[in-house]
Image (cartoon, rainbow, N blue to C red):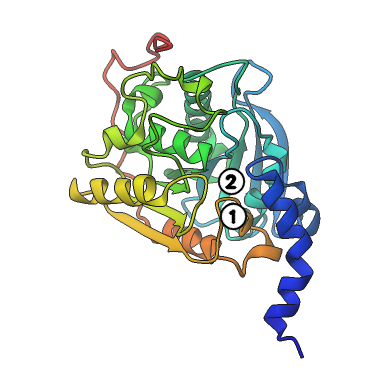
Amino acid sequence: MPTVRQLILLTLLPLLALIGLTACAPVRVLNAIANSSEGHRVDKAVAYGPLARQTLDVYTPTAAAPAAGWPVVVFFYGGSWNTGERADYAFVGSALAARGVLTLVADYRLYPAVRYPDFLRDSALALAWGFDQAARLGGDPRRVFVMGHSAGGYNAAMLALDPRWLGSTGHLPAELAGWIGLAGPYDFFPTDNPDAQPVFFHPNYPPKAQPIEFGNVHVVPTFLGAPVNDKLVSPTRSTQALAAALSAAGTPVTLQMYERASHTTLIGAFSPPLRWVAPVLDDVAGFIAATPPAMPPVTPPATAQRASPLAAR
């Protein structure tokens, strides 16, 4: 007789196969299976900038807010910077909101419409919107986190580690309570990924365009998670190396490696049907709950406020 685990595996094999085929592309199947209305409400297509893809969905917990407001997460999805839609990651927003986290799932412009660093400019605008609107939405402005998976993990890392991007919006990385990177590429030049190559001007890669180049500075508390056997992004070269560099610089780092997860099922595990794959939702929610608020905001230098757009390369 098959065990319960075997029955679950047999039930989910078609789902896992579909997810594996779609990689970081839309994962609507997880949204269809998950209870997308439990414990939260959603405001869709909220503009954080003037362009069509500068929009986000706001997942607000329905439970009573803490006295200072809910913690806030601004989430960026993956897709090699050339695919992805915020609606496909409703299961992430739903899962975090059900845990009492006000969650913003943001779109950003993609290749071939843009290349590096325009998607970072969009991400910075979305995060700045989160800072500016947190209190109005019921969130705690001192407990804002930026989070991403895969290419979105790169975006989150660059916002947290490189002050150029938030500086152009009048904010600073120090305003973050922390940041969360899941299976992100933090050291990947030169890349053999044909989707990523044109995004970063292969073989003429821009300087200071990798998170690992900023690993030697003390930054806000960090959560890094990755599959042990990630076939798309090296967990050793990216996640473990960045964790080691940040720790050596004095940054508080929580590192979690997941035995059963793949690159894609790591984020899929936020959805109820795949939560047995990895306890990543519990780990992320625990990190958010345990991380203290950011220090009171420091007024950025006048030269950093509303800086002119950075050069494309």
Outermost residue, bottom side: 1
SS class, disc 1:
helix
- In the rendered image, which quarter is residue 96 located in? bottom right
Q: Are marks 1 and 2 in contact (CB under 8 Å)?
A: yes
Q: Do we see residue 265 in this rendering?
A: yes
Left or right, 150 with reference to 1: left
Judging depth in this view, the residue of 312 and 221 nearest the camera is: 312
Left or right, 86 with reference to 232: right
Quadrant into which the N terminus falls: bottom right
Q: Which of the numbered marks, if any, corresponds to residue 96?
A: 1
Quadrant into which the C terminus falls: top left
Q: Earlier in the sequence, mark 1 or mark 2?
A: 1
Give the CA distance from mark 1 to mark 2: 7 Å
Q: Residue at x 78, y 52 (%)?
A: 29
In the rendered image, residue 199, in percent from the top left (x then y), is placed at 51, 22
Q: Residues within 10 Å of mark 2 (few under 14, many from 20)?
A: many
Q: Residue at x 64, y 16 (%)?
A: 51
Q: Residues within 10 Å of mark 1 (few under 14, many from 20)?
A: many
Q: Residue at x 43, y 21 (%)?
A: 169
Residue, disc 2: 103
8 in relation to 92, above or below = below
In the rendered image, residue 49, in percent from the top left (x then y), is placed at 59, 20
29 in relation to 9, above or below = above
Q: Do we see residue 141 in this rendering?
A: no
Judging depth in this view, the residue of 163 and 20 nearest the camera is: 20
SS class, disc 2:
strand
300 in relation to 135, above or below = above
In the rendered image, residue 283, in percent from the top left (x then y), is placed at 47, 63
Disc 2 marks a residue whose amino acid type is Thr
Left or right, 125 with reference to 274: left
Disc 1 marks a residue whose amino acid type is Leu
